[in-house]
Image (cartoon, rainbow, N blue to C red):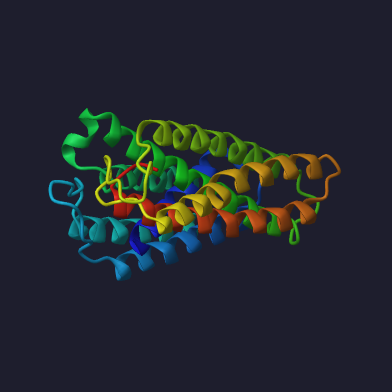
Amino acid sequence: MLTQFAIRLIFGMSLVWCVMPRSEVTSGFFRIQNLVTLGLAVLAFMAIGPAPVAEGAEPVLSAEIVRWIAIGLATMSFLGSVMWTLERRAAGTRFAFGIGIVSLITVVLSSVPGDGFLTLKGNLTWLTEIAVAAVSGATVGGMLLGHWYLTTPTMSTTPLNRVNWFLLCVAVDRLLFGAIALGLFWPFAAEDTAAVGATSWTSTHTVWLMLEWTGGILGPLAVSIMVVRILRYKNTQSATGVLFVGVILAFIGEMTGALLRHELQLPL
């Protein structure tokens, strides 16, 4: 689970690099971001292990393959940091897109079995994984970008605005996928009802679902709306503080949601 968290965060952060106006941000920011994803890739490599899954639900990518992918992501992140240090912005951008593509493929193929792409449940699962990763990456990327204004206070607020609007869009996507999943897989008419889940629904799952929606969906939505209003006054540090709260909420929602999806084998 820790490996999946790290890979999702790598994808989410690299996605932010791809959508933000890179020409308006100094190279030092991207150098540090690549070092962060380097550390996350090493964490993914060290934490990986055979995860217990339901019979027939083994994902396309095995743990051993993901281990080698983590090594590749670490190497790409290191080379990307070198390019940004040398002010080779074009090369650094290519590494950013490369990290994003590789981590996207890993997130998708490590979340569903091969036949999952032929079912509504399987497709909703990997779409949910992408949305979760994008929300976490946007909150972390926005928070770190906000801190970067301490070193370059004259930098335009356009990049932070773009990242925040991206957070709003992916949070809405996450809300949409979550609502669809609840409508399709409503498994908790009673605590002893197994329904379509891999196990019976209990009060613990109810708590996890509440934490996931509060922290991982509604929290980032509220944070992005607040930051939009704050940035009207060019107050980047207040916006950064709000985004820091968003990071905490997103992580709480992501981890409890991962527990829920793993135990029930449902894209909730």
Q: Nearer the viewer, residue 133 or 192?
A: 192
Q: Please tell me whether residue 76 is drawn above or below residue 109 in the rendered image.
A: below
Image coordinates of residue 211 in percent, x first then y, are 52, 54
Work out which residue is located at the far left of the displayed protein and give it: 56
In the image, what residue occupies the spot 32% across and 43% down?
A: 266
Q: Residue at x 18, y 52 (%)?
A: 54
| Quadrant in the rendering for residue 195 | top left
Residue 190 visible to the viewer = yes
Q: Position of residue 172 (x, y in %)?
A: 56, 34
Identify whether 94 is placed above or below 51.
above
> Quarter holding the N terminus?
bottom left
Q: Residue furthest right?
A: 233
Res. 91 visible in picture: no
Coordinates of residue 32 in the picture (x, y in percent): 56, 61
As drawn, is 198 to the left or to the right of 26?
left
Question: What residue sits 46% from the left and 55% below the top?
Answer: 208
